[in-house]
Amino acid sequence: MEGLTVPALEADPRGLTTAQVAERVAAGRVNTVPERSSRSLGAIIRANVLTWFNGLIGTLFVVMLVVGPVQDALFGFVVVFNALIGIVQEWRAKRTLDALAIVGEARPRVLRDGTEVQIAAADLVVDDLVLLGAGEKIPVDGVAVDLAAVDLVTTAESALEVDESLLTGEADPVLKRPGDELLSGSFAVAGTGAMLVTRVGSDAHAARLASEAREFSLVKSELRDGINRIIKFLTYLLVPAGILQVIVQSRVAGGVRAGISRSVAGIVPMVPEGLVLLTSVAFAVGVVRLGRQQCLVQQLPAIEGLARVDTVCLDKTGTLTEGGMRLAEIRPVGPIPDEQVREVLGALGAVDTRPNATMAAVIEACPAPKSWHARDVAPFSSARKWSGAEFANSRGTWLLGAPDVLGAGTAAAAQAQQLGASGLRVLMLASRSGPLNSVVLNGADLSDVEPVALIAFEQRVRPDAAPTLAYFERQAVTLKVISGDNAVSVGAVVAGLGLPGAEHPVDARSLPEQDGPFAAAVEGNSVFGRVTPRQKQRMVEALKAGGHTVAMTGDGVNDVLALKSADIGVAMGSGSGAARAVAEIVLLDERFATLPAVVAEGRRVVGNVERVSNLFLVKSFESFLLVVLTGIARLPYPFLPRHTSLIGALTIGTPAFFLALAPNTARARTGFVRRVLRFAVPAGLVSGAASFASYSVARLEPGAGLEVEQTSAMVTLFAVSLWVLMLVARPFAWWKALLVATMTAAFLLVALLPLGRRVFDLHFGTWQQTATALAVAGCAAVALELLWRFGHGRSPSGKPGDVHGVSG
């Protein structure tokens, strides 16, 4: 921000007054931010109603209401019903997202009327004084100001380090001094500070960040893109086939009304109108289900990404272990006694206004001494692995951090290694003879630092950690624990949870710099300690480059880069605002055990959408072939719209709704379009050929009228479609068998009752004709079974069965 000067705060160093806030709100200088949910009610209605296919079906619906009986217009009512279902389900999902977003959103701290308060980001106004601490994202644009100017703390504590890597790509945190520009999209990684707001709403980077945070990954959705490609392909088939259908049927069907009716009967089934509906319904139901488990899905496509995850990277602290800690032991390693060590620790805790879990345990166990005043402060940084302070009145300079950083190569560091092997988290207290300012920056010389004491902390392992890790192992999901803690300590904790490979933890400082060896080391090991934030990101990127779909879980500011780089970022609800902002999934209730349910929901959605896609597309290709064959033979189309509506409802629409919401635990694979078309195209052609064969055989019977011929074709098509349903529904469970039996009973009820036969214009001939129709269907079923078993029904293990490798 060139030429920007520090605004004067002398007039009102305690922030804005209520009247000043109201004045800025009235002037429109408030931080109006985009909605967090996907779209408004109006947009949801438009998306579910105003589609190309709905326009086509709606036009044909109106035509049939004019020229034919209402039974032949049933397909239009189905489309209206489907649209209503889609609107209701997506609206439910939107309300769930909105409610959870309010719970999970970061609330900036501001000074107003001389008091620190938390407000919604949307309530920030220009000239607000925002307080910042480690882990908090910068919500709007502004300039850094001196905390001492508002009489909050000493100047020594206002050392604010900001990570701008999400904006600039620069790896190192930037020390912000009064007058420096602060941009939304960056986040504080160390220290404390204050910011005067200069730009809000659409004028700030925050507006773009809100959009980018939801879209930075999974902009390309294989499921969505695949369905769009299939629909585009079917459109190319629909246009010429529709023209052929209209021309032929208007000439051979025996009248204008009959010609229109049979033309519509051939065109409507080619349109997979329910496929897009069921896809959006499946995603919306997934959002609602996860919402009930206090899981906020910040991007709908994240549900699809979850289904493809084969590697989960875990941060230990806050994920496998609970956030809180307990100071377990103080072990002096120098001449300073235990009492003085506690006094120093209390002083270090007192100058940390934004303590992390470790420092909170220190503060709880070591009261702050009187008359200790900090002259300079180095806040904790994940990159340098230590914090420190220089105190006035000759009380010295003290550092608290990783033993293998502060005491590298010393006997005290070796003791810390042994202590950490029991699973304790160990820090070192060290003294320095010189001032602090020469060692504040990363990479500083620590050769004159003297170890004083080892401080051991007891970490509480989450009770649900072990069963959750076991679940992922059963699901063939690889786990990688990457932590900033000592590798031996991390390995000891994880080994107790039964993770394979935990007995060989790797110190990340020993990892090679070259990309190839680095990626091989990450691939071949399970537990890593002393990992810097940049290394976490690099590990995730290496796994992705190796062909893995990676989820990253974390809660701290040191996890932000890795969360953003992962295919799916999962943040804990009580974690830093920066972590929650870039994650696609936020576990609001902090339960690590929710993660298997999140992954399972993604698998259910994607696996079931692929499953039901086969049903809709088999119908489309079957109708296309029938249109072509009857057009070439110049025959009346064998079905009326009411026939295709009945078969579609019993073998596609109703079963697909239940199948789309069924359990499904198999990991999704790439190649959605190829797999679906590889079955749907030949199966559709087999179904269409069988129907045309039955129709043609019936025409050879002396005295058989068109009504009998079309009924024979309908019996064959229903039987074949029912077999396709049974193939797609595999492996069978009791409820699937009940579903198929119910659909069969419904068709038999229509066929046996006089009212059903009259409404759907069914005219059965001799029993030999019905037997012939069923025999043709049996031959088609055999062909479909062979197609499934030997061409398309092999699971990833190579065994015949479910084409998608999904469960019942």
Image (cartoon, helix red, strand yellow):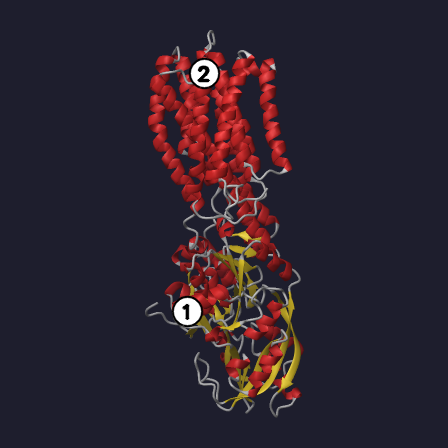
Give the number of callouts. 2
- The residue carrying mark 1 is 517
Q: Position of residue 386 (x, y in %)?
A: 52, 78
Identify which amino acid the numbered label 1 is placed on: Pro
Write the residue at 43% across / 63% down. Answer: 542
User: Which is more toward the observer, 87 or 171?
Assistant: 171
- Mark 1: give few (<14), some (14-19) or many (20+) Cα within 10 Å: few
Q: Position of residue 502 (x, y in %)?
A: 57, 68
User: Which is more toward the observer, 495 or 694?
Assistant: 694
Comparing marks 1 and 2, which lies closer to the viewer?
2
Asked if the residue at tag 2 contacts the one at tag 1, i.e. Cβ–Cβ closer than 8 Å, the answer is no
Q: For this view, does 332 lie left or right of residue 209?
A: right
- Mark 2: give few (<14), some (14-19) or many (20+) Cα within 10 Å: some
User: Which is more toward the observer, 480 or 52?
Assistant: 480
Q: Eyeballing the image, is 26 above or below 458?
A: above
User: Which is more toward the observer, 520 or 789?
Assistant: 789
- The residue carrying mark 2 is 697
Secondary-structure class at tag 2: helix
Q: Eyeballing the image, is 272 above or below 533?
A: above
Write the residue at 60% across / 21% down. Answer: 748
